[in-house]
């Protein structure tokens, strides 16, 4: 028999309520679900863009799309996957899980949280609106100046791109402030920083990186905006500006952004591997400090994206050595993950498949990254398909696999239902095979001289075979994603009820029902271990017969013993977000719309500021005040 | 279900990247690993160093991962709990120091080569060439020899070529994989790149930095000539023959001269590629099409359908005019 503790029945009512309740929700769990659904939707959009790219390149002299369309497709694919898929998918898991994992009733600023989500959503819609006006951006996801200048790019595409990414940047910064405060201030009693789950640790580092990395990119975008809208010359060489300034500002953001995208996945894997090998994370303090070190060093390596720019031997050497240094803490993480599996009782469930897949694939991306750290080697690989292979082993093999590990791991917690193991493993194998078929041959293509971002190539270059294989692989990935959606729908419709603790978890989120109640914790837990629920179930010793249940954190009771007040839903954050997006989007239409946006924004923020958190009729739970006690 | 077999199958599947690597490694005749210059050789040598370190680490770490998975695969009941090991500091120190040591061995050749590659050219009498990137073609100036050409670079074998790189519009990147690593052409500033070609032949290259619509079509050829061939080519460039003055007239009145230069004629336009001795080139339209009368005619009729976005306008030439121009241009040799 399992020693699995009994938890209360799930609170499906968490998700009930009409459209209005979703638009005005301030519940971190519902906002997490909104982020997740949006991100998965854009995953399909960005995926379709990738499939068209692959069809065009399947043979030499492809005729599926033209030159301009192709440039638009890869620009939108990159921008979509980075800003509309990977970041919000991480945000989904952060939103849903962090308060549950640290024992909080919500995030520090619930309405700011709603504002972040809606600002992100409106920003992402603005970006895709460029398809409707027939002019998506076409200068690549890192939009090098001066190709983005009015002179060489007179259409509106670049404007859509720079405005929407700035709007989404505001969402990210707001959310970073929110989660930094949440993690630092809202932990349950006894949860010291060193007892905090690794996922929360990585999330904290990501928030700090966002706070520090988004300002430089905002400056870069404001310069570009001034160049394009007001005729300044920050990046215009003819007028004394310098296009290379953009490269510095972009990559000072861009390299930390890589860690913003990969650390959440590191965090997930550091939760999943211990759970399914039934051991604690090996070397947890080293995992924490290596994460901090990676984040810190990440700000000092940006020019490794610029080894062909011509910065000189001294700069190249400094950035090369700094980049190599990052390999050390990254290696520490990989070895600790393997050591976590070592000696465990490994249970091969779908989340473990994805987590292990992430480790195995990320190693490949990390090692090709070491090659790029060496300028004599990098100048051959830079801007070729070798780099395309590298970045997809990091972002697809690393981030996507890691986030799917998280989705499968927390799916029962979020939906209250189990998700099919058979289809889950099918999803894994198809995605694993498809991913390697697609991206591994790209190493060969790059080494053979195929640059990235070309819509066509000549047949006599010998690039057709591996390109065709990559295209086949891309469609295998597409099928795997389809399997995931089928699995998800089947689970939501008719999945087996999960119970609170389906995986025999160690952390606080498993002490509550699935899905959790609106108020999360009926009793705010007291924590005296990094694995409070494990300690409750198994005690400090290996011998289960002598375990002492008292030391850990017990499962949550069914109903709160005391009255719990929750913040009331509010429509003002979404209105403020709408106003902000109108300010940005209005710049494409006319000054009047910008002014309308300003008015809506000011009005929304004003009403928001003066609306009490707990209004008449706000949600309450537990015994009524003064009654029955 | 047969557990053994499925384990075996899954191990096989997990080894897929390694299999693919085998397929690729079976014929690494990749251009970047076939250097034909000292510059390319230096980079390829560092690659040869790095690839063994990285492949070695890859195999060891992936095997450790696979071993752990297979060895500790559990069928045991959930009430049994493995030994709860929290960590082991000596191990942590080991797997910090060992990678650091490996990186040290990677860093040494890296740093040495960085300074070699970006130092002064190895020879005093280097051939100076100025490369200017344009949307979407290459301008090659030979200031010492006094002529300019486009899209097909000629260099003598065994003599160092010293390139000055810049751009007339947006950022491009100069890259001939077999010659060596790329370097950007930045508008408003100059970069340098030297190489000493070691093998006679024709080598493929193309722009490596996204530069707009026809970035993919911004291709070039490099001809590494033996000294006699190069001298003959340079002499012809310095004193081009103009066999057909009627054709030259057609070239002028058709408007071509507004953008193009043909040395020895009144055509002195500077916007488009220099067409001196264009009949001697093997390719047209930045190396996009072979230099045949048919392709030349097609290009003159509709530049945009050959090279999307091409800045050369469609002059709506009638067939007779096209034929005259083709005859004239192909005769420039
Ligand atoms: Cu980087
Ligand atoms: Cu280009």
Image: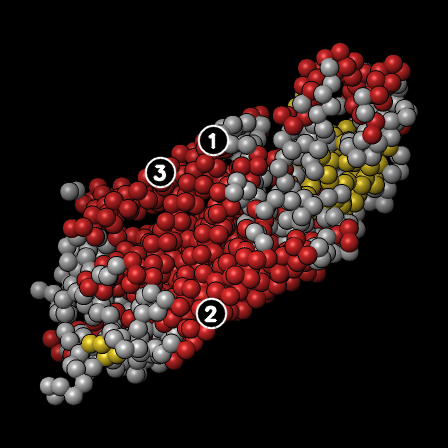
Q: Is B43 on the left or on the right of A481, as rendered?
A: right
Question: Disc 2 vs disc 3: which is toward the camera?
Answer: 2
Query: Which type of secondary structure does the marked residue at label 1 adopt?
Result: loop
Mark 1 Cα-neighbour bin, 10 Å: few <14, some 14–19, many ≥20? many
- For disc 3, the marked residue is A476
* Residue A90 shows in the view: yes
Up-down relation of residue A248 to residue B59 (above or below): below
Q: Earlier in the sequence, mark 1 or mark 3?
A: 1
Q: Are marks 1 and 3 on the same chain?
A: yes
Label of residue B156 in the image = none
To which chain does the residue with label 1 belong? A
- For this orientation, the residue located farthest to the top is B320
Q: Is A69 on the left or on the right of B300, as rendered?
A: left
- For disc 2, the marked residue is A603
Q: Are marks 1 and 2 on the same chain?
A: yes
Spatial CA distance of label 1 from label 3 is 14 Å
Q: Quadrant of the C terminus of chain A?
A: bottom left
Mark 3 Cα-neighbour bin, 10 Å: few <14, some 14–19, many ≥20? many
Residue A381 at x, y percent in the picture: 58, 45
Residue B191 at x, y percent in the picture: 75, 49
Q: Earlier in the sequence, mark 1 or mark 2?
A: 1
Up-down relation of residue B137 to residue A364 (above or below): above
Is A321 in front, or is A404?
A404
- For disc 1, the marked residue is A58
Q: Would the CB of label 2 be found within 8 Å of ligand 1?
A: no
Q: Quadrant of the N terminus of chain A?
A: bottom left
Is B333 in front, or is A94?
A94
Spatial CA distance of label 2 from label 3 is 49 Å
Residue B92 at x, y percent in the picture: 41, 69
């Amino acid at each position: 028999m399992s020693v699995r503790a009994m938890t209360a029945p799930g609170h499906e009512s968490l998700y009930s309520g009409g459209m209005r309740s979703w638009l005005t929700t301030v519940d971190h769990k519902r906002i997490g679900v909104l982020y997740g659904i949006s991100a998965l939707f854009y995953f399909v959009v960005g995926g379709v863009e990738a499939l068209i790219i692959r069809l065009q390149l399947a043979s030499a002299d492809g005729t599926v799309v033209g030159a301009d369309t192709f440039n638009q497709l890869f620009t939108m694919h990159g921008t979509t996957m980075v800003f509309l898929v990977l970041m919000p998918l991480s945000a989904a898991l952060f939103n849903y899980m962090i308060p549950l994992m640290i024992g909080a009733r919500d995030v520090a600023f619930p309405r700011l949280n709603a504002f972040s989500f809606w600002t992100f959503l409106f920003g992402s819609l603005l970006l895709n609106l460029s398809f409707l006006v027939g002019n998506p951006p076409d200068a690549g996801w890192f939009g090098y100046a001066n190709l983005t200048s009015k002179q060489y790019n007179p259409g509106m595409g670049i404007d859509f791109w720079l405005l929407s990414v700035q709007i989404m940047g505001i969402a990210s910064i707001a959310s970073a402030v929110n989660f930094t405060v949440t993690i630092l201030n809202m932990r349950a009693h006894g949860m010291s920083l060193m007892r905090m789950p690794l996922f929360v640790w990585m999330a904290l580092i990501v928030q700090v990186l966002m706070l520090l990395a988004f300002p430089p990119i905002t400056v870069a975008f404001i310069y570009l905006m001034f160049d394009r809208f007001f005729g300044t010359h920050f990046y215009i060489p003819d007028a004394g500006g310098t296009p290379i300034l953009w490269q510095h500002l972009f990559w000072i953001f861009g390299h930390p952004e890589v860690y913003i995208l990969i650390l959440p996945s590191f965090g997930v894997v550091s939760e999943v591997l211990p759970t399914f090998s039934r051991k604690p994370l090996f070397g947890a303090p080293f995992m924490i400090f290596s994460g901090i070190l990676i984040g810190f060093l990440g700000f000092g390596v940006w020019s490794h994206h610029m080894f062909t720019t011509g910065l000189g031997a001294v700069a190249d050497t400094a950035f090369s050595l700094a980049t190599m240094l990052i390999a050390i803490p990254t290696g520490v993480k990989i070895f600790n993950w393997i050591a976590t599996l070592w000696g465990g009782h490994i249970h091969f469930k779908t989340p473990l498949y994805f987590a292990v897949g992430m480790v195995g694939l990320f190693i490949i991306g990390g090692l090709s990254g070491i090659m790029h750290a060496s300028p004599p080697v990098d100048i051959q690989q830079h801007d070729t398909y070798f780099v395309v292979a590298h970045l997809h082993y990091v972002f697809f093999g690393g981030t996507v696999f890691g986030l799917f590990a998280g989705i499968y791991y927390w799916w029962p917690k979020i939906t209250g239902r189990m998700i099919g193991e058979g289809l889950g493993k099918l999803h894994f194998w198809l995605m694993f095979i498809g991913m390697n078929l697609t991206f591994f041959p790209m190493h060969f293509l790059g080494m053979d001289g195929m640059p990235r971002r070309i819509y066509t190539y000549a047949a006599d270059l010998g690039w057709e075979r591996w390109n065709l294989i990559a295209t086949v692989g891309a469609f295998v990935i597409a099928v795997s994603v389809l399997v995931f959606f089928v699995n998800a729908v089947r689970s939501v419709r008719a999945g087996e009820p999960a119970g609170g603790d389906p995986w025999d978890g160690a952390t606080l989120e498993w002490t509550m029902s699935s899905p959790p109640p609106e108020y999360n914790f009926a009793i705010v837990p007291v924590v005296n271990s990094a694995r409070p629920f494990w300690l409750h179930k198994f005690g400090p010793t290996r011998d289960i017969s002598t375990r002492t249940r008292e030391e850990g954190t017990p499962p949550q009771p069914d109903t709160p013993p005391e009255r719990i007040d929750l913040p009331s839903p509010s429509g003002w954050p979404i209105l403020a977000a709408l106003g902000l997006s109108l300010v940005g989007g209005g710049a494409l239409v006319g000054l009047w719309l910008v002014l309308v946006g300003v008015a809506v924004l000011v009005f929304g923020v004003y009403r928001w500021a003066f609306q009490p958190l707990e209004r008449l009729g706000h949600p309450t739970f537990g015994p009524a005040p003064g009654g029955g006690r | 279900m047969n557990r053994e077999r499925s384990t075996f199958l899954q191990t096989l599947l997990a080894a897929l990247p390694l299999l693919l690597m085998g397929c690729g490694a079976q014929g690494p005749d990749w251009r970047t690993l076939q250097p034909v210059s000292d510059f390319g050789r230096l980079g390829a040598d560092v690659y040869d160093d790095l690839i063994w370190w990285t492949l070695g680490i890859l195999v060891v770490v992936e095997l450790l991962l696979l071993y752990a998975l297979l060895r500790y695969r559990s069928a045991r009941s959930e009430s049994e709990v493995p030994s709860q090991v929290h960590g082991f500091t000596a191990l942590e120190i080991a797997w910090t120091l060992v990678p650091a040591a490996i990186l040290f061995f990677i860093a040494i050749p890296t740093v040495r080569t960085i300074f070699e590659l970006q130092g002064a050219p190895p020879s005093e009498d280097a051939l100076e060439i100025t490369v200017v990137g344009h949307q979407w073609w290459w301008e090659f100036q030979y200031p010492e020899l006094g002529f300019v050409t486009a899209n097909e670079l000629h260099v003598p074998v065994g003599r160092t070529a010293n390139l000055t790189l810049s751009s007339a519009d947006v950022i491009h990147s100069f890259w001939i994989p077999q010659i060596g690593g790329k370097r950007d052409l930045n508008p408003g500033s100059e970069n340098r790149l030297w190489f000493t070609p070691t093998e006679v032949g024709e080598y493929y290259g193309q722009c490596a930095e996204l530069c707009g619509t026809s970035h993919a079509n911004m291709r070039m050829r490099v001809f590494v000539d033996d000294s006699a061939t190069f001298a003959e080519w340079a002499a012809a460039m310095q004193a081009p023959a103009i066999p057909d003055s009627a054709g030259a007239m057609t070239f002028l009145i058709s408007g071509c001269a507004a953008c193009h230069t043909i040395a020895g004629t009144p055509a002195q336009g500077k916007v488009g590629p220099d067409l001196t001795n264009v009949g001697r080139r093997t390719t047209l339209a930045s190396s996009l099409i072979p230099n045949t009368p048919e392709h030349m005619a097609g290009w003159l009729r509709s530049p945009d359908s050959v090279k999307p976005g091409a800045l050369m306008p469609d002059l709506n030439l009638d067939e007779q005019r096209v034929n005259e121009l083709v005859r004239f241009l192909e005769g420039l040799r």
